[in-house]
Every structure is written in structure tokens, then in C-alpha cells.
Amino acid sequence: MKITLRLIVSLIIVVALVAIGFSYYQVKIERQRLVSELERRTILLSESLEESVIPLVQSKSFVKLNRFVERFGNRERLLGIIINNIHGEAIASTKAISGYAPLILPQVLNSISEKRAIHSFKKIDIKEVFIYTKCFEDEEGNIAGALSLFQDASFIDVRLSEIWRYNFIRLLILSVVIVVITLLVIRWSITGPIAQIAEWIRDMRLGNEKVKKKTKTIDSDVFAPLIKEINHLAKTLTLAQKSVEEERIRLDAESLWNADKLKAYISEKLGDKKLFVISNREPYLHLKEEGRIKYVVPPGGLVTALDPVMRVCDGVWIAHGSGEADRLVVDEKNKIRVPPDNPSYTLKRVWLTKEEEDGYYYGFANEGIWPLCHITHERPIFRLDDWTYYQKVNEKFGLAILEEIEDIESPLILVQDYHFALLPYLIKEKRPDAKVAIFWHIPWPNPETYGICPWVREMLIGMLGADLIGFHIQLYCNNFLDTVDRFLESKIDWEQFSISRKGHISYVKPFPISISPEFSLNNTSTQGKGALKESLLKEIDISASYMGVGVDRIDYTKGILERFRAIERFFEKYPQFIERFVFIEFGAPSRTHIKRYRELLAQTEEMADNINWRFQTKNWKPIVFLKGNHSHERIIPFYMTADMCMVTSLHDGMNLVAKEYVASCLEDSGVLILSQFTGASRELKDALIVNPYDIESIADAIYLAFTMDEEEKKTRMKKMKENIVDNNIYRWAANLITELTRL
């Protein structure tokens, strides 16, 4: 369409320029002709009048002279006559123009002194007038006076305006003709055949049988060579597609990344080498309950993503021991085999003082870096004491990992997240042979935003100690390179996405994290979806037809308040769903040592209560807020049966809740409402993508989720599920380890 518009506009401009040029030339020639004709007629008239005027002037018969000019002054286009004596005095004039005598005096005097005729155009009373002045002689040959004729010349401008108007009308008609003809020609000769060729190629891509018949329907001399080549290509592709499909069917079962495949792959890649993971959060923590020690899996995407990998790798996971009973279950080296029910790898715990935890974790990491990177309009707080503790804790973990790898040649180390930005450099400084990667689980903002951090250079230098720096999506990689370029002296290769500084090269790549494919195996139930949903709602004492679910840590980045406002707006716009729809929010309190998080928890509870008070009935309320740390076993049945899941993060690195819901959804009959500001939105394109700040659009998305055709729901869900199964956590780990071992 743009090309067609450009072609039409170009043709019209060219035609318009030609028409304007031609009209200008035509007007110029016509004006010359009309002026010449007017001058000729005026000269003839003056010569005929001169014979009668001279005797009357010589005899000084001024009364007769005035009667004479008055009689001749009303001819066609002749406005009047003025006769002057040799001194320039008007001795006779037509009454209608008698007042113009002073106006032409200079012209009269010039005509008498120069003894020649003079003519001019003047604007008189908003009318174009042609004034012709000619001196006349007496019988002795002496100049006796001058005769001036006033001719109406306005008809010239009228005639020229008509030419312009007629040519403009012709141009408009011609433009319409050009547009119509151009559109028809393009449609018949270009766009039509191109559309047919495009459809043909699409059928080839999809393996449609219609592809064999396309050549008969496409008639175009212009594209004949292209059609001929595509015809050959179609035959080749048809054969290739058959072969590929046969091979795909054969390899389909083998292509899926699973625990066994990853284990074999890592064994091949690493041999006897172990993978070392460092993170703040431990995969299992131990608590005291009724005099007994039990273990729990803390919430969060990091643990969900890495635990399956470590089970396969039989590596060492170094983390902060934060459970109240953690010290009671470790050995003398602060280690324990996990998971307790099936020991598969080693967990080494690092102990922090209360001051260290407050400064490093709650202070610098979560009051500073967390809001800074998420850009959620929460002001980051940076304190020198917090930074000091951040450095100290990074050094403590550095000593822990160096102790573990002391006797290991070229160890592979995977540092996790923003808590340990300084650690890669600390490791590399002591062990240059180590292969170090750091994976940043949260977003990386633009340089202007990250530059707010007072220690931005130190943070970047620490991270550039790594051989490989991973983010969830390409955008964060780009932002990181821009930040380094802004604040550090370094060489950046935008083709290889690498940073060279002081002889060390760091590669920056995206690795979209996912979940275990085994997660989807949980979506089995002895009950049907409807019966299971009914039992779950009965469990929480709610009666409803539709159920939505949200699973989040209580964090201002998750958009929980915006989600609740959208639910409230949904009931305002669509009151027919009152008593029919209930939203279950699993909210896990976190970082409660930070005032802002305590305030957010209170705000969340208050908003849920207010909305419930406004809409609830005897046996129903719109929002059920389940506060607490919930296990996957508790949440998965709600994933399985929910008609809709809402992920409305204001900013998120990936968000695995979205993927967990898709993997668990029974009968593929569910809808995911997903924030555009999550990394997951780049992969799960068949979700209903929303702006979490746009409450109206989220309310409408909820309505669409409940009214969407069942076939469309299943189609969307199947596509997302295939993406998750194919790009699972094992593939993520394999890609990460592949890149790390390749360096």
C-alpha cells in the first residue's frame, strides 16, 4: 500500500508540475496577446479621434470639445477621454473620469516633451485600467496638446483567471484518472500476482496440497521468471517436507530435553567436573515445627529453575543458610545432601550475621538494586554502610567457593543474580583458570537508570570478571552493553556481543529461563476439571462458575494492587459476573524486614477487603487472598482448574508463574493474562498481553478470557505449552553450560 501511494503521489506531483508550467506559459502568452490587441484597438481609436479633436483645440471650442469627448466616452471598454493643452492642463474630459486628470499628468507631460505615445497600466478604483496618451500637432506642425484614452483592462485578469481555473479542473480530473488507472494496473499486474505468489509460498511452507495447482491460477508476464523458479522450488520443498516430517516423527521423542538427556549431555561436556552454583537463596531450608525439623522449598523462580539442574549435575550449591534449623542438620563443613527425600547434590551453607544480612540483603540488594533494575517508580535507597556489607558478604562467599574449588582444575562456576555482582571478579582474581558465568535473573535497565547507583563502576567491574554474563532476553543484554560503554573504558564488539577489558573478554548472551518439563506431568487428576474446581472452591467456602488465580511474592514489582483494581473495574463494567467469578491470590510475604514490603502487604490485604466488602454476598466474595508460603503441591490444583491466570508484573525478568500455569492447565482450557513488561511475554505470545498500568484493558482482558471461544483457548494454550515443553529448564541449562564450556 505504501508503494502504491508513493507511486500515485509521484505521478500526481509530476503531472501537477507539468500542468502548472504549461498553464503559466499559456497565461503568459495569452496576456501578451490581449495586451497587444488592446493596444492596437486603442491606437486605432486615438487616430480616428485625433482628426476631430485638433480643429476644436485650435479654434478653442472647448464646449464643443467637451460634448465630443462625452459622446465618445461610453464606447465598449472605453472608460473616458481626457484632452490636455501643451502645458498639461485638462481642457476637456469625460465626466466619469474627470477626477483622474492629475493622475495622468506626468504621463501627459512626458508624451508632450518626448513627442511620442506613452501607455501604462494603473489600478484605479480596484480596476485595472489601460491609459494611452498621444500628443497631437497643429497645422503648422507644432505640438498642440495630448489625447489620453482610458480603457477597461480588467477583462484581461478575468480571462487569465478562467485559464487557471479550467486548467485546475483538468488537473483534478486527470489526477482522478491517474489514481484509478494506477490502482487498476498495480492490482492487475503487480499486487494481485504478488498476493497469489505469497499465498503460494505460504502453502508451500505449510505443506498445503493446493500448492500444486497454484501455477495455473497465476497469470503474469512480469513475474513469469519468478513463478517458474518457485514452481521448481515447490516441487523440491514438497519432497523435503515429507522427508523432514518423517525424520521429525522419528526424532520427536528423542529431541525433548529431560533430566536423563541433560545428565548424559553434561557427562559428555563436563566429564568428572562438577558444577558450582552460588546464590543467596538456598534451595531447601530447615525449620522447627512441634519439636521436629522439617524442610521447605522457598518460593521464587531461581529455586524452581535451578533445583532440577543441580539434581542432574550432582554439583555443589553454595547459599546463605537462613532457616532457623539449618545449622542443626549440616556437617562440620556446613554441608548437607539435598533434597532430603532423594539426595542428589550438595548444599553448602554460608552463615551471615544479622548486620550482614540487613546491610547486604535487605539494604543494598533489595532497597537499592532491586527497585533500580525494575523501574517500578519505587525510589532506590543507597547507603554507604549497606555497600560496605555488600562487599563484605561477596568476599565471604568468594572465600567459600575458593575453598570448594581449591583442588579442582578449571572449575565451572555459575553465580546467581544481583546479590553477587562483585563475586566473578573476586573469583577470577584468585583463580584465572576458572570458567565463571553470572546469570542476572532480574531486568537490566538503561544506562541512565543504572547510573543512579553510586557504585555503578564497581558493580560493572565485578560482573566483567565473568567469562559469560547471561540475561533473560536480548533487550537486557543490549542495556548492559550500553551501560558498560557509558561508564567503563572498554572495547565492545556488537557483532559478537562481547566486552574486552584489560585483556579479559566477557560474552553477554540471552538465556530465557524456564521450568522443568516434569512440571506439566502434575496436571493429572482422577477427577475431571469441573469436579476438581468445585472441590477446591468448596474447600475455601466459595461458590462460583469461573475461577482465576494469581501466585506471587508480595512485592511491589508484581503489580498485585493494579491487578486488584482491574478486578474491581471488571465487576463495575460487567456486573453480570458478580457471584460467578472468584479470584484466588496466593501471596507469599517476603522481605518483611523492609518497611515498604510490610506496607505493601497491609495495602494488599486492605484493598482485597475493600473490594470484597463492596461486592460480596452471603456465599461469595470476589477475591480470596491466601497469605502465606504455599507449596507447589498446594498451588498446582488451582493452576490445573483455573479458567484464567493473571500475571501483571510492572517489570519482571522472566516470571515463571506464567509458564507454570500453562504447563499445568487441564484440557488446555484456560487463558493467561500476561504483562507486556515480563520476559515471558517474548515467548508466550498467545497469552492476552496487557499493559499492567492500563486498568481498563486488563478488565476487558478478563472479560475476553471468559467469553473466548473454547477452540481458540485450546489453540492458544497448546502453542504456549509446546513452547514451554520444548524450551524447558534442561535446555536452558544445556545452552548455558555449552556456552560456558566453549569459552
Image: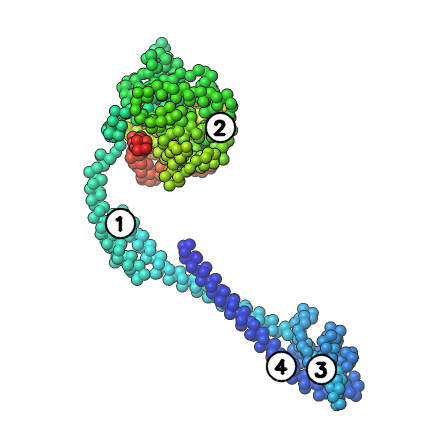
Which quarter of the rendering shows the N terminus? bottom left
Residue designated by label 3: 115
Residue designated by label 1: 204
Residue designated by label 2: 455
Q: Identify which residue is drawn at 61% across, 76% down.
A: 35
Labels 4 and 1: the sequence-earlier one: 4
How far across and down, in percent of the image, does residue 202 sit?
29, 49
**Callout 3 amino acid:** Lys
The Cα–Cα distance between marks 1 and 3, rounded to whole angstroms, is 93 Å
Q: Secondary structure at mark 1?
A: helix
In the picture provided, is 128 more to the left or to the right than 337? right
The Cα–Cα distance between marks 4 and 3, rounded to whole angstroms, is 19 Å
Labels 3 and 2: the sequence-earlier one: 3
Residue designated by label 4: 40
The front one of 654 and 192 is 654
Dot 1 surroundings within 10 Å: few (below 14), some, or many (20 or more)? many
Is residue 687 visible to us here?
no
Contact (CB < 8 A) between labels 4 and 1?
no
Q: Tell me the tag on residue 628.
A: none
How far across and down, in percent of the image, does residue 540 sit?
38, 23
